[in-house]
Image (spheres, grey):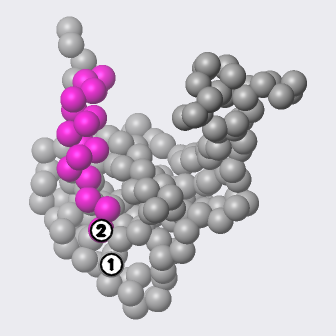
Amino acid sequence: MFDRAQDPELFRSIFDQTQVLRKPLRGIIAGYHVLPYILVGAPEEQSQRSVEIRGKIRVSPKLVLAPGRHGQTYGDLFHEQEVMDQALVARVFSFLYTARHQVTLEHEDLKVIRSDRDPETQIRRALDELLRREIIDTGVILCPRVRFYPVSIDRFITEILEQEFR
């Protein structure tokens, strides 16, 4: 039987439909960094209710990945001198994930809140709270299918990285 949860087109659709409504006003710094977020979406088949997930994405310092200790570059490795840089730079992004949305979960890095409000109202409340408290480092994400919220978190990270490298 075909498992819909493993469907790459479903993931692409969720990624494309995710709306990053607010990005942190400061970027990723050189060392370890934390990107807080508030993600809101409707639970499966209950579009008039919402699930709010508040979490933190931990970002590692830049990692420089060199192919070898003896001066070999990526250009040497891939036989390409003009396009490949000597070292690739990467970061590791990590965040907590729970597959069980029926439980009440609260952790320093992840909090799942169920609400009787629709997702649009819950998002407005979250944006108002951030504005009132003058919080500038928290992203706000509207997720089309909260069951697959890590895909929406991936969209958020992608937009942050695009912003960093402009």
Q: Which mark is residue 127?
A: 1
Percent coordinates x, y for residue 52 in the rendering: 34, 61
The residue indicated by pointer 2 is: 21
Choose top left, top right, bottom left or bottom right for residue 88.
Answer: top right
Residue type, label 1: Leu
Q: Which label's residue is closer to the chain start, 2 or 1?
A: 2
Answer yes or no: do the residues labelled 2 and 1 have beta carbons within 8 Å? yes
Q: Nearer the viewer, residue 165 or 24?
A: 165
Determine whether 77 is above or below 149 in the image: above
Determine whether 87 is above or below 69 in the image: below
- From the image, state whether disc 2 or disc 1 is nearer to you: 2
* Mark 2–mark 1 distance (CA, rounded to whole Å): 9 Å
| Apparent side of residue 30 relative to residue 123 in the rendered image (left or right) | right
Percent coordinates x, y for residue 157 in the rendering: 45, 53
User: Magenta stretch: dominant SS?
Assistant: helix
Residue depicted at 41% across the width and 82% down the height: 130
Residue depicted at 61% across the width and 20% down the height: 78
Q: Nearer the viewer, residue 53 or 9?
A: 9
The region drawn magenta spans 5-21
How dense is the environment of label 1, judged by Cα within 10 Å: few (below 14), some, or many (20 and up)?
some
